Image (spheres, grey):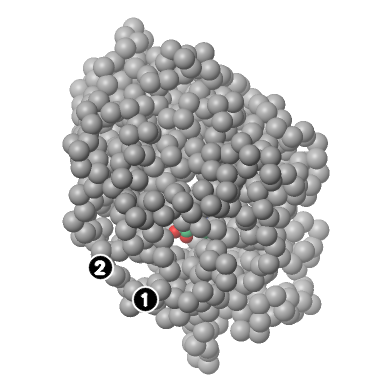
Amino acid sequence: MANTQEIVSVLTESRVFPPPEDFSRRAHIRSMQDYQRLWDEAAKDPDKYWGDRAREELYWKEPFQTVLDWKPPHARWFVEGKTNLAYNCLDRHLPKLKDKPAILFEGEPGDRRAITYGELSQQVNRLANGLKSLGVKKGDRVGIYLPMVPEAAVAMLACARLGAVHSVVFGGFSAEALQDRMKDAGAKVLLTADGGWRKGAVVPLMKNVEAALPNAPSIEKVIVLTRTGDGKLPEGPKFVAWDALVKGQSDTCEPEWVESEHPLFILYTSGSTGKPKGVLHTTAGYAVNASLTTRWVFDLRDDDVYWCTADVGWVTGHTYVVYGPLMNGVTTIIYEGAPTQPGPDRFWDIIERYKATILYTAPTAIRAFMRLGDGPVKQHDLSSLRLLGSVGEPINPEAWMWYRDVIGGGRCPIVDTWWQTETGGIMVSPLPGATPTKPGSATFPLPGIHAEILDRDGKRVPKGQGGLLFVTKPWPSMLRTVYGDPERYVNTYFSELPGMYFTGDGARTDADGYVWLMGRVDDVVNVAGHRLGTAEVESALVAHPKVSEAAVVGRPDDLKGTALVAFVTLKQGNAPSEALKKELAVHVGKEIGAIARPDEIRFAEGLPKTRSGKIMRRLLRDVAAGKQSSQDTTTLEDLNVLAALRQTDE
Ligand code: PRX
């Protein structure tokens, strides 16, 4: 149960950036009046609004009659309809887009491939036929554990074509994480590769699979793509070479027309405690919102070269690398490797060479680039870019400004998009041709999305005051359950206020009604009776010119209830010192107020992060409290970081 005391909001940001006029003129949604009109229409008659959107976004083999059947907390959308998501991503664009690149792929070692819509369709159909030959059918679960290569998208689409339920496991996860997920999902087949390239080295996927298999007994077959090695398979009847499986298969495969509510994928995400939750998404509602939000939020045009840098192992990779862009028939870039391999300018080199028009990435990456300075960016012509996006955590205003000025050349609108694995698609975000943006605010909920900031009694909190972020009405791409654990679905998401989805995030609105995310509620600390969003203190620290990254957590304190401990990484060329600690504490005091001044500042070479770049605050809480951690570290990017932090302790 979240602590729902009032959250004191302390950050103020007064800069406003209206959308550039020439951008608005050509945009899908061109003004706040248009946004408001859509919002009002959706609120007044949600069935009509979502029904219209569903008919516009998808090809329906059989039409739906019922837009929504809502028996809180269980929703069924577009009930009688039948469709197929692979058909919507591929077939319906052919023959018109047959020769248009669907995927521009760049491997970390520098290998490149352009795959047209026609070719992608062939590859998907061949693999679908191959999977069929192994007995995969509608409803079967299929694991995908691949590097960021086009075959990851091919695998997802082949599953969707057959009505099989994919569960992608991020290629950076360990054998243990893989086996737990495969076991929980009861996966019948696993698609993997011998390895992938990351930071100049091979990620040993096959080795992990071999270690996981004895504990994942449901897996009957393992399909192995050759990416880094010589094509030799491990011994045993389970292993099938990808190439051999698809060779000779037909280029056509009749799509399985599935019911709207047929499960599309399970994606595991960590909760604040316990084992990862298998978030289950179904077909039509997810697809409608994926397609719509990609077009509106990124204001897609036919000639866009769109790059979302997320891995398909995360929900952002599902919705905004694969399904959203392909449903819209645009060209999407897939890059396999690390952002700074072989040099600090790899991203900018890719943007220049492919003339990318849209970049969608995470604040943690933006801050890492900031730390490297403007030099690597300035070596490249980024004038093709017209829109920038941010996702995954609150973006601090300093990083937002750097993103805008240095990457976007001051001309590209920024969409700071708030959403979650559970929401399936973007929920709160600027519409770039309409919404005046403020650095650090995700601005307003999209039409049809009732994101509201409430107190524990379900009352709306006044403007300026923090509260809990709920989504008070169902939306098409909401998760349907936690796979295999329906009670956990109810307890985690619908037990704070009946019938309302609890996001776990704190937020506030400012005087103009803009939404500001304040971090997870369990990252909110109570200092001397005041609740503070740790994200806000972090933002203040990062605003200091010498600070690269900061994470703030609470530590039990006899006097104040909770003391604030800040872990700080410095920008290159700055040395830790006692004087600097004082300077930073004073700086936070000045930026926010004495209440937010950290009680302790610790300098660190690195912060413990998940592989998707989220700082693992729960680990830092243990470090701050001087405790050995009993927490799950399977998602930690680099265990050494934790060891180093502990050493500074002694
Ligand atoms: O705390 C919010 C933060 O990331 C959480 C969702 O994480 P995940 O399910 O891994 O999905 C990440 C990609 C959608 C949210 O509960 N978050 C995500 N986007 C933002 C954000 N916090 C602030 N601003 C955002 N734009």
Q: Residues within 10 Å of mark 2 (few under 14, many from 20)?
A: some
Is 514 on the left or on the right of 398, as rendered? left
Q: Are marks 2 and 1 in contact (CB under 8 Å)?
A: no
Q: Taking 463 as reference, is 340 above or below it?
A: above
Does the beta carbon of the residue at mark 2 sit less than 8 Å from ligand 1?
A: no
- Mark 1: secondary structure: loop
Q: Position of residue 175 (x, y in %)?
A: 38, 43
* Foreground of the two, 410 or 592: 410
Q: Which residue is mark 1?
A: 459
Q: Residues within 10 Å of mark 1 (few under 14, many from 20)?
A: few
Q: Residue at x 30, y 37 (%)?
A: 284
Q: Residue at x 37, y 19 (%)?
A: 91
Q: Which residue is mark 2?
A: 498
Residue 575 seen from this side: yes
Q: Position of residue 38 (x, y in %)?
A: 44, 49
Q: Residue at x 72, y 79 (%)?
A: 590
